[in-house]
Amino acid sequence: MSVTYPIKNRKTLERFKGYYAVVKPNPRNYTMIIMGLNTAFRIGDLLQLRWKDVRDSSDGRLHTHICIREQKTGKQRVVPINPAEKQVLTDYYAVCQYNSPGDYLFPSTRTNTLPISRYQAYRIVKEAAIHSGLDEHISCHSLRKTFGYHAWKQGTPPAMLMDLYNHSSYRVTKRYLGIEQDERDDVYMRIDL
């Protein structure tokens, strides 16, 4: 099994995110990538989301939080819907054919009664990665790892990331962050005692 990496470079990340918004417009794929980057859900949990998980069917407003039970851990997870997600969900809802409360957020094009497969999600992510010039191994799990890497770079304590990920050990979280020698060197070079 090969290792997946977070997308560390901000310009590359912007190209990656923009692939399905600008280069090859596809609202479903774009929304999946933005939601994956901003929620840090595992792809299996992300693909199981339905409109009722993000939007109130009675008044049409977006929920403030997404509440799921993680497939892998069985733990309850509550994640706020941030402004980037609100915008993409609002835009996507306006053009989505299948947006009844019970419909999947990311329906298969073959049958709208099922979500896209994990393999199709992988192909979507891989295509955007290749277009963005990413030569590292990028997969659906890279969305989750990218969230953690950029949160960590913005000052989120590793213990908080461990909690957000529902990891049982710090060692797993540390591996997720993909800390490399150049980042270790940067710490030493910035210190001036």
Image (cartoon, rainbow, N blue to C red):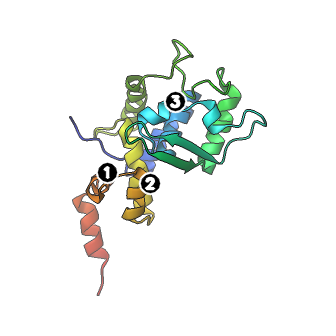
Instruction: Look at the image and tell me in which quarter the N terminus lies.
Output: top left
SS state under label 3: helix
Left or right: 117, with 181 as reference point:
right
Instruction: Identify the residue at image location x=37%, y=31%.
Output: 126
Where's residue 47, x and y in %?
48, 30
Determine if residue 75 is in view: yes
Left or right: 129, with 35 as reference point:
left
Where's residue 189, x and y in %?
27, 74
Viewer-nearest of discs 3 and 2:
2
The tag earlier along the polypeptide, 1 or 2, is 2
Where's residue 155, x and y in %?
44, 66
Viewer-nearest of discs 1 and 2:
2
How much space separates mark 1 and mark 3, taking CA atoms?
Answer: 24 Å
Amino acid carrying label 2: it is Leu
Amino acid carrying label 1: it is Tyr
The tag earlier along the polypeptide, 1 or 3, is 3
Tell me the tag on residue 176. 1
Q: Are marks 3 and 2 in contact (CB under 8 Å)?
A: no
Instruction: Identify the residue at image location x=28%, y=63%.
Output: 183
Amino acid carrying label 3: it is Asn
Instruction: Identify the residue at image location x=37%, y=63%.
Output: 158
Residue at the extreme bottom of the image, as rendered: 193
Name the residue nearer the viewer: 191 or 22. Answer: 191
Name the residue nearer the viewer: 153 or 133. Answer: 153
* Residue placed under numbered mark 3 in the picture: 29
Vertical side of 18 occupied by 78: above or below: below
* Residue placed under numbered mark 2 in the picture: 164
Where's residue 29, x and y in %?
52, 29
How much space separates mark 3 and mark 2, taking CA atoms?
Answer: 24 Å
